[in-house]
Image: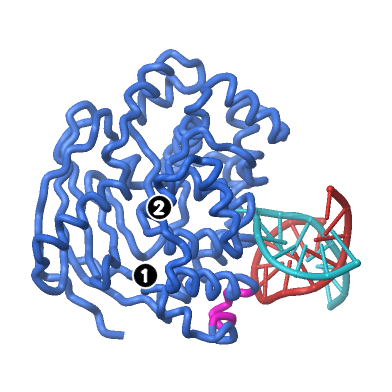
Chain colours: A blue, B cyan, C red
Amino acid sequence: MRTIKLNQKYSVALAPIPPFNFDATFHKPSHFPSSDCHWEKDKYLITMLWRGKYLGLKFGNKGTVSRPKVKLTICSQKLLDKKFIKNLIPEIEWRFNLQDDICEFCKRFRNDKILGPVLKKWKGTRPVAANSFYETLIIYFVLQNAVVRRSVQMLKNIFNRFGKKVKFDNKTLSSFWPPKTISKISERTLRDLKLGYRAKFIKRVSEQFVKGEIDEFKMRQMPTEELRKECLKIYGVGPASLQYILFEDFYRYDFIETIAPWEQKILSKLLYNKKLVSIEKIIKDADKRWGKWKNLALHYIWEDIFWQRRHKKIDWLEKEIRL
DNA sequence: CATCAGGGCCCTG
DNA sequence: CAGGGCCCTGAT
């Protein structure tokens, strides 16, 4: 496969609403690694397919948590016109949740017994919908009923078959494909990529996007309950995927209807130092403590333990992560 | 070696 | 609303 070289560059300074934690916003240590992005301290790269153009985004940290500044470099094959860029920037700001104001959250729980210490480290962190809704759905599908290695394998297989390789900032990364590519592929072919029963989901969803039946821009504006119903209509999306979608793609910080089994075990340990606390209790307690911020609060606690895992071995945690 | 649940979801009855 | 089937893999 030919690598697309993205040699044209356009740079712009972005100003996230403080507080803003660069590294913990762009990089989520709990996520499995994906070849479409790359993170190192103060720097983040990701590929993007926008209006038919293959792009490489490079973000550099040029500020602090309280005075954030981000340098964005958009890399492309050909020179981009003004209109294209003018359209693209707000989309990037949405995807990386730069204009969200979480000041109240960070202030209100400064002295919270559980959140306080975590906020000290990670204040200014937000969830990010780094990929388009279509792309995120693909990721959630490969997460279903699979251990990490298998999810990674499935994603790699589809990237290799349908994605392109793009090179920018001296790195070669994978890029997603337009939905049209897969809508025309037979389910058999997809199954050969070891996608299993998910092949049907991926095909159906690709077709829906091609027909314009799913409009993520409209969905962003919907009240949560309407959005919830809209998501559940999507073939292959049930309660588990919905949970991720509403938080990570649409930033609904108070939405918790379910907790995945392995997450339940980890949260039981972290919040109660117990083996298994019922999902209902975890949700109820989180609601009482953090109210409309409850899911964001859990996100902080969750990612914090995975940051810790990077430099020290946590035996009980290793057992719960199904590699 | 076989059997089975699982970081779900769909479909049927 | 309950339960079977599905791609696979690791646990028993």
Q: Residues within 10 Å of mark 2 (few under 14, many from 20)?
A: few
Disc tally is 2
Q: What residue type is disc 1 on?
A: Phe
Q: Nearer the viewer, residue C3 or A147?
A: C3
Which portion, as a residue range, is magenta? Answer: A190-196
Q: Give the residue at x 11% y 70%.
A: A7
Which numbered mark, 2 or 1, is in the foreground of this view? 2
- C-alpha distance separating marks 2 and 1: 22 Å
Is residue A271 positioned above or below A74 on the image?
above
- Which numbered tag is attached to residue A218? 2
Write down the quadrant of residue A150 in the picture: bottom right
Tell me residue C8's x, y (percent). 65, 73
In the image, taking residue A172 as reference, residue A220 lies left or right, namely right
Write down the quadrant of residue A33 in the picture: bottom left
- Asked if marks 2 and 1 fall on the same chain, the answer is yes
The prevailing secondary structure element of the residues shown in magenta is loop
Q: Where, quadrant-wise, is the N terminus of chain A in this rendering? A: bottom left
Q: Give the residue at x 22% y 66%.
A: A55
Q: What residue type is disc 2 on?
A: Lys
Circle nearer the N terminus (2, 1): 1
- Which numbered tag is attached to residue A18? none
Please give the residue where the numbered disc 1 appears in the rendered image: A176
Q: Give the residue at x 22% y 37%.
A: A16
Q: Where, quadrant-wise, is the C terminus of chain A in this rendering? A: bottom right
Is residue A269 positioned above or below A181 on the image?
above
Q: Chain of mark 2?
A: A
Is A257 one of the magenta-colored residues? no
Q: Is residue A275 visible?
A: no
